[in-house]
Amino acid sequence: MEKGLFITFEGGEGAGKSTQCRRLKSALEEAGHDVVLTREPGGTAESEKIRDLLVQRDGGNWTPMAECLLFFAARQMHVEKLIKPSLAAGKIVICDRFTDSTIAYQGYGHGFDIPTIEQIARLSLGDFQPDLTFILDLPVAEGLARSLRQKEGAAGRENTEDRFEKLHMDFHEKLRAGFLDIARKAPSRCVIVDALQPVDDVYLMITQAVRESM
Ligand code: TMP
């Protein structure tokens, strides 16, 4: 592979993105590929600093526009410093969340104007897009229950990175509908994955879709 491949994972809370990202990375490495696993917000030292401002309790009470610009400031650094150079070196980049999360969370979820988000995306990233996006879909109640269980298992984390998960059920329903809408509008890039299936079945579906796209 000369050009690299940019794969993103999207979905609400508790859908199992991080687990699937790690398993896909191992599978691709075993098959001999060079793989970079990264996340948003974050992925570079500067972008991780912005992550702290956005997802930690007391990180700041941002206006919707400022919040959106911070997500894209982190993303622009991440794309220029890590993602594009890795792709240019022929690597596979797996990213836990990307622009679809801003459209789903800030747009569909919080009601920030979606055409404005798309305009900021074009200004900061041009037409740069993932090659393949997995949208892990789960009923809201199940996702939140799983997310809570994960937090109970990771003592201490719930005291910091919990800003977006404490939001109302209604918000998470909007989020889920938003991700499904994004997938419907970009069927050649997005694959909707039923995350209620056993984790091994989800993994098989993902690895098969990645193989087909190579
Ligand atoms: P994570 O839980 O996948 O690590 O993501 C951190 C939180 O940030 C999560 O609640 C979703 C939220 N988020 C947004 O609201 N907008 C974005 O653009 C991104 C990338 C994440």
Image (cartoon, rainbow, N blue to C red):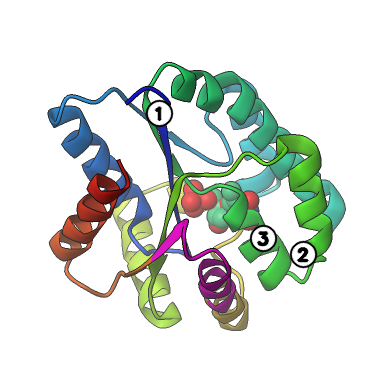
Amino acid of disc 3: Ile
Stretch of the chain drawn in magenta: 177-191
Q: Is residue 151 above or below residue 125?
A: below
Please state, as top left, top right, bottom left or bottom right, where the C terminus lies in the image.
top left
Amino acid of disc 2: Ile
Q: Quadrant of residue 134?
A: bottom left
Q: Is residue 98 left or right of residue 102?
A: left
User: Label 3: which residue?
Assistant: 103
Q: Residue at x 17, y 24 (%)?
A: 32
Give 151 or 173, whichever is nearer the viewer.
173
User: Label 2: which residue?
Assistant: 114
State yes or no: discs 2 and 3 in contact (Cβ < 8 Å).
yes
Q: Who comes first in sequence, dot 1 or dot 3?
A: 1
User: Label 1: which residue?
Assistant: 4
Dot in front, 1 or 3: 1
Q: Position of residue 78 (x, y in %)?
A: 60, 29
Element assignment for label 1 = loop
